[in-house]
Amino acid sequence: MSETYDVAVIGGGPSGSYSAFLLASVGTGVVVIERKDGAVSAPCCTGVVGSGYADLVGVEPECVVADASSAVFISPSGRRLRVESPVSQALVLDRALLERRLLERAAGVGAHVRTGTVVLRIDRRDSGFELLLAGPASREVVHARALVVAGGVGPGLTRQIGLGGTQRYLVGAHAEIEMDDVSETEIYLLQDVARGLFAWLVPVGGHLVRVGVLGPRAAKAQAGRFLERPEVRRRLRKREIRITQRPVPVSPLRRTYADGLIVIGDAAGQVKPTTGGGLYFGAIAARAGADVVGQALAAGDLSSKALSGYERRWKSDFGSELRRGSRVRRIYGHLSPHQVDTVIDWAARRHIADELLESPSFSFDRHSRTLMAGLLRGLLGPLARPRLPRVGGSE
């Protein structure tokens, strides 16, 4: 005999588990289906977030391994732009611990969590959905009135439910290594290696450093080359480094809802095109989705029309941020190494970065407007003709 739930959440990552927590906390019958078995895995992201995410989700202090108030940007020719804030601008999270805590929180309010379980097939039924699962021991069937699809980057599930896949991807590579002399975040703009490529080093305590690379292709190979750069290699404590690679969706699905279901987080392409970070927007989408699905369940109407409010809500909240971020990403991808040098040099001499950082509108979580302003000023500033003093006249 199969079990029946109000909602099946497919994917127990941060977005899925937060959605399950919100739904279960108001009495909704929820099952979370997570393919990982709970074992610690290689890092899939650097885990840098702003205070907005920490406040929204309620990140526990033990999940924070470091914070950051400064960073240095390094251009292809080695020009440097250092920015610093008197207050912390970002938190570095233990991503594996965060996922465990969010899943535990969902289970604590009544959600049924099934790890090590894969969704093999989804079929529509008059009462909702029938899911064929492959668990640690055997196959089984569960039924759900509604689905929240939060299964990460792979497009298989979204295509199976008729919503297609994300149109544009970048590729990210990550590793955790031991290094000397990395006291603050270092961001390397690598236009001399490949257009649109950048890398970073983020210290997380002691000699431990998280390294990442994001670009249009072959990020794992590019990360290996980045670690061989003399200014990086000389600080490495060991040479054998495990690098993981994954695709990063940088455009949302054309539609993130259908009859009986919504899609959230990476699966929906709700990811910052600038940095590849998806925790913050995924959490906002999870909250909007939980509200809309909860109301639809209460009304007994899970039609596409009833669930369309989910998409209106998330687009109203951060749709413009995604669009601006895409424009910033395209501009950066077309810059030459010399132009990147020019932007960094001009911004350093004119203190543009400090000015933007101190603006009341600056937000680590919503930074596309700030990056756009910095790029345009850095590119156009050197072209502006200097004002010449008047000769033979008065003011």
Image: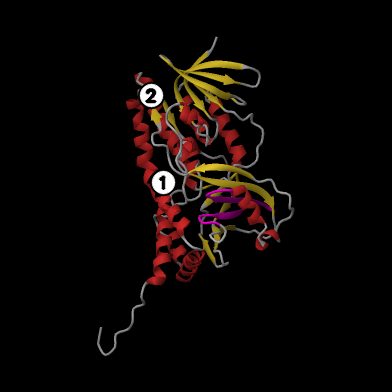
Q: Residue at x 34, y 20 (%)?
A: 299
Residue 315 lies in the magenta-colored region: no
Q: Residue at x 65, y 46 (%)?
A: 243
Farthest residue, direction bottom = 392
Report which residue position mark 2 lands on. Answer: 259
Residue closer to the observer: 331 or 389:
331
Q: Position of residue 217 (x, y in %)?
A: 55, 48
Q: How is the image coloured?
A: secondary structure
Q: Position of residue 68 (x, y in %)?
A: 56, 54
Query: Which amino acid type is marked by label 1?
Result: Leu
Residue 226 located left or right of residue 393: right
Farthest residue, direction left = 394
Picture quarter with the C terminus: bottom left
Query: Which amino acid type is marked by label 2?
Result: Asp
Q: Residue at x 40, y 65 (%)?
A: 377
Picture quarter with the N terminus: top right
Residue 170: tell me if it is visible: yes
Q: Residues within 10 Å of mark 2 (few under 14, many from 20)?
A: some
Residue 203: tell me if it is visible: no
For residue 64, above or below residue 162:
below
Under circle 1, the secondary element is helix
**Labelled disc at residue 168:** none
Residue 234 located left or right of residue 314: right
> Are discs 2 and 1 less than 8 Å apart at CB?
no
Report which residue position mark 1 lands on. Answer: 322
Q: Which residues are magenta?
A: 194-218
Q: Position of residue 312 (x, y in %)?
A: 34, 36
